[in-house]
Amino acid sequence: MSAFYDEVQKIRERYPEGSRSAALPALRLAQERHGYLSREALEEAADALDVTPAFCYSVATFYDMFHLEPVGTHTIEICTNLPCGLCGAQKVVEAFEEALGIKAGETTEDGNVTLKAVECLGGCGYATVVAVDHRYRHHVKPEDAAGIVEGLDG
Amino acid sequence: MAEHTLLGGTEDHDLTKLAEYRAIGGYGAGLDRARAMTSDELIDELQKATLRGRGGAGFPMGRKASLIDRKNAKPKYLVVNADESEPGAFKDRQVMATVPHRLIEGCLIAAHAIESKDVFIYIRGEYLTEYEILAAAVEEARKAGLLGAVEITVHRGAGAYICGEETALLESLEGKRGQPRPRPPFPPIQGLYMAPTQINNVCTIATVPLILDMGAEAFAKTGVPSSPGTAIFSVSGNVVRPGNYELPLGTPMRTLIYDHAGGIADGRELKAVIPGGSSVPALTPDQIDVPLDYDSLGAIGTFFGAASLIVVDDRCCMVQLALRSTKFYMHESCGKCTPCRVGTRWMVQILESIENGTATRADLDLLENVGDNILGKVLCALGEFAVYPVDSYLKKWRPEFVAHVDGGGCPFHGSSSLEGILAPSDQHSGMHTKLEVLV
């Protein structure tokens, strides 16, 4: 059996027998391995969880952090909910769009960066919040966009 | 403990480290006192403290513990709701990042009260750094033998606002789509894995060690009689010094906004305060002398909520505010109840037509009508959270809505602070596009 299978079994031990509580951790691991939840990734997770691929698909489609299509190597997620919005988040979105040459919701042609507007990240007092590869940057200003993009590995 | 506050000690100590938390009295006399008590005695102590839940509903924590079906042969579970996702709220995150051991100590005491050996902390998936800090703190406490027979598991969510709703959280923790359950049965009778379950917010549980350390009677004398203790208030939006401020309950809202947060930024005028996170009715500037506690805010028609104030200055168009807020609730609706799933979409469409000047005055009534048909007709509070704020903007700033309709467009002429703000629901393609066609 694969290392992935073994790792999922270890996670399953933390929860009562017969429960599906390991589904979210297993899908997260599968996504890390494959880059996104492809059919193959969902089947692998289903096998390790002892559930159907359809169950994994139904769970994966519910949560924003699971990707059912390929995404960039890097992700830049900009909060545009009310508190960040009131403090100028739209200008930050536009600055990143310009720096990357794509619109929010798109991935650069070379597959390196996905840019997204996202709902509240829980950093409202430090607007605008931008998550770069899931690590928060606080107080991001439009003029910071180019530097953040340059700082990403090619 | 020298200072009986949630964030107490963080200025001089790195309380993510076990040794430093112990140096200020952590895992000390309070925990020993709790462990020496029987379950009944401890629940009694917690009831005397009258600590009210900090997650939003304000239900007394001790009373919640007393409702647990302890005679049930199944395991009892304690679940900590760390799925902080309410726009405006960022307090739980600071607790987990700076005082994780206070939360863990609270878990041990609360678990003892309900005779639980299994604790799950459900943390929102986006809080990666906080997850790492908290998981490391749990591991450090375990290695030091502090957990005793209690197992604490930090479980990460995967991005869904609805999972902050307690029964949706349980579904998600069971590995399913996070959709709310019908009640009854309530979680203290049938919760996680159909077993008796207590669910509390991070700040509620992290306050428990303070109660045991100072004694319930002394704790009950802090804050105001109906809402004892301190709360961490998250202040965001158009203020000079946004951030988290821990203050006694009952502190006037004006003091928080003007003295602590430095007043309105950029020399602008205050227009609105959304006091409990984006889901609650907004207040006008003449209402901000209200004391910040559950009952005082309730008396003026709003909610304490997640103690998260979004301060809005006079540059903001209230129709745009309503539209952006509703796009969030539409995006986060789990889809289970039709009034919420479809109603939030209708609200977005009506608000868009008001904003772009194609609506009629009858559409303002229609907007209210759609809201009325969501309220009370859904399984959980999310649908209502979409309606409460919009309803308040419509009632309190009605002339602004009417000006959009009569003037055939937005009177802010492109100068609103939320002008053109993009929402995630605007950018999705594929599946989401197809869903829009269905309604």
Image (tube, rainbow, N blue to C red):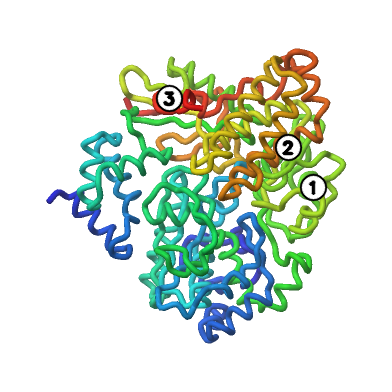
Coordinates of residue B321 in the picture (x, y in percent) = 68, 30
* Labels 1 & 2 near each other (Cβ < 8 A): no
> Label 1 sits on what residue type?
Asp
Question: What residue did someone put label 2 on?
Answer: B391
Disc 3/disc 1 C-alpha distance (Å): 49 Å
- The residues tagged by marks 3 and 2 sit, at their Cα atoms, a distance apart of 29 Å
**Which residue is at a point 54% across and 39% down the rendered structure image?**
B338
B351 over B223 or under it: above or below:
above
Determine whether, in the image, residue B387 is placed left or right of residue B340: right
Which residue does the image show at 30% across and 45% down from the upper left? Answer: A55
Residue B434, labelled with which disc? 3
Q: Quadrant of the C terminus of chain A?
A: top left
Q: Is residue B208 left or right of residue A60?
A: right
**On what subunit does the disc labeled 3 rest?**
B
Q: Is residue A100 above or below residue B383?
A: above
Q: Which chain is mark 1 on?
A: B
For this rendering, which residue is in front, B265 or B358? B358
Answer with mark 3 or mark 1, whichever residue precedes in sequence: 1
Q: What is the residue that sits farthest to the right in this orientation? A: B286
Q: Is residue B33 left or right of residue B135?
A: right
Amino acid type indicated by mark 2:
Asp
Q: Position of residue B13 (x, y in %)?
A: 55, 62
Position in image of residue B418 (x %, y %): 66, 25
Q: Is residue B21 visible?
A: no
Question: Mark 1 — residue?
Answer: B259
Q: Nearer the viewer, residue A49 or B26?
A: A49
> Spatial distance from mark 1 to mark 2, Cα to Cα?
30 Å
Q: Is residue B74 visible?
A: yes
